[in-house]
């Protein structure tokens, strides 16, 4: 049982060997697979996953789900794009921390409109579908030994599957997730608008980019928890 114990007993079970990879790969948010010291290693590593990748240009959206891909190809995988097609953009999942601190990231964020798609629109949105798949896969790893906890946490998804939560709820996941984590773990610090899902083990790009109205971006351009909002949202 984990009621009242916080998420630490659970997230420790999902520790990632990728934790420090982005400390040296792509430290300036540049694609570095072509560097002589990394090229051969990267090609062989991708081959383990059944992918033939000779350069970052060979990576499609599905390939960019891999932490390795984001570590050596952060630019093409969208680590430096506030509206990029991968959800898991933290250093634990491969993206260099520098990517969200670049001038190009800030400029792209400033240009984003303060609009939010409806549930039906998000259910038909390829990026949102990718986010859902990534979220589900990550929770499958973190909660591999805690099936009952996972089923309760993702009860809104069809069949209690975490992969289906975003598809089912759209931006309604903001309120739902905070409520469920508080109910199960007695925590108040969860805020998916800021990318805070499940302790340090599950942080993502801020959902405030896709859900600015739900996240209150039209009343506070920097959010209430330090998260970024589209630049076109009014203060």
Image (cartoon, rainbow, N blue to C red):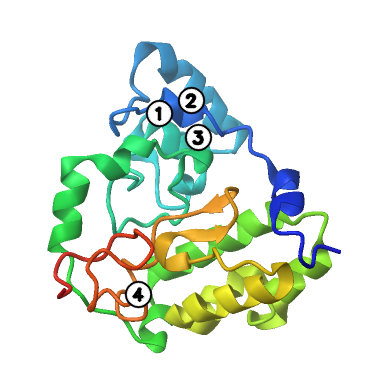
Q: Which residue is mark 2?
A: 43
Q: Secondary structure at mark 2?
A: helix
| Residue 69 position in % (x across, y down) | 45, 37
Please report contact status of discs 1 and 3: CB closer than 8 Å, yes or no: no
Label located before the other in sequence (3 or 2): 2
Cα separation, mark 4 vs mark 2, equals 37 Å
Q: Secondary structure at mark 3?
A: helix
Number of other residues with Cα within 10 Å of mark 1, as a class: few under 14, some 14 to 19, many 20 or more: some
| Residue 170 position in % (x across, y down) | 45, 80
Q: Secondary structure at mark 4?
A: loop
Please report contact status of discs 4 and 2: CB closer than 8 Å, yes or no: no
Q: Would residue 170 be seen by someone viewing this image from the given angle?
A: yes
- Quarter of the image that includes the C terminus: bottom left
Q: Which residue is mark 1?
A: 54
Please report contact status of discs 2 and 1: CB closer than 8 Å, yes or no: yes
Q: Which residue does the image show at 38% across and 38% down from the upper left?
A: 97
Most foreground residue, 141 or 204: 204
Q: Which residue is mark 4?
A: 211
Label located before the other in sequence (2 or 1): 2
In the image: residue 203, left or right of residue 10 = left
Number of other residues with Cα within 10 Å of mark 2, as a class: few under 14, some 14 to 19, many 20 or more: some
Q: Nearer the viewer, mark 3 or mark 2?
A: 3
Cα separation, mark 3 vs mark 2, equals 11 Å
In the image: residue 169, left or right of residue 29 = right
Most foreground residue, 84 or 6: 6
Q: Nearer the viewer, mark 4 or mark 2?
A: 4
Q: Which residue does the image show at 41% across and 11% down from the upper left?
A: 37
Q: Is residue 234 above or below residue 203?
A: below
């Amino acid at each position: 049982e984990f009621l009242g114990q916080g998420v630490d007993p659970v997230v420790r079970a999902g520790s990632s060997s990728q934790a420090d990879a982005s400390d040296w790969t792509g430290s300036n948010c540049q694609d570095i697979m072509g560097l002589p010291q990394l090229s051969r290693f990267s090609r062989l590593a991708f081959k383990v996953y059944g992918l033939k990748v000779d350069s970052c240009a060979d990576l499609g959206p599905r390939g960019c789900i891999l932490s390795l891909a984001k570590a050596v190809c952060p630019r093409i995988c969208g680590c430096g794009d506030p509206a990029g097609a991968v959800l898991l953009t933290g250093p634990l999942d491969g993206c260099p921390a520098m990517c969200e601190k670049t001038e190009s990231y800030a400029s792209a964020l400033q240009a984003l409109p303060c609009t939010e798609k409806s549930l039906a629109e998000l259910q038909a949105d390829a990026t949102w579908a990718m986010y859902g798949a990534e979220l589900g896969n990550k929770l499958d790893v973190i909660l591999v030994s805690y099936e009952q906890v996972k089923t309760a946490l993702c009860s809104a998804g069809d069949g209690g599957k975490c992969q289906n939560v975003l598809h089912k709820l759209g931006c309604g996941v903001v309120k739902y997730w905070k409520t469920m984590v508080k109910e199960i773990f007695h925590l108040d610090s969860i805020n998916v608008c800021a990318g805070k899902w499940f302790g340090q083990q599950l942080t993502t790009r801020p959902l405030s980019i896709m859900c600015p109205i739900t996240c209150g971006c039209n009343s506070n351009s920097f959010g209430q928890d330090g998260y970024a909002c589209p630049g076109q949202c009014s203060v």
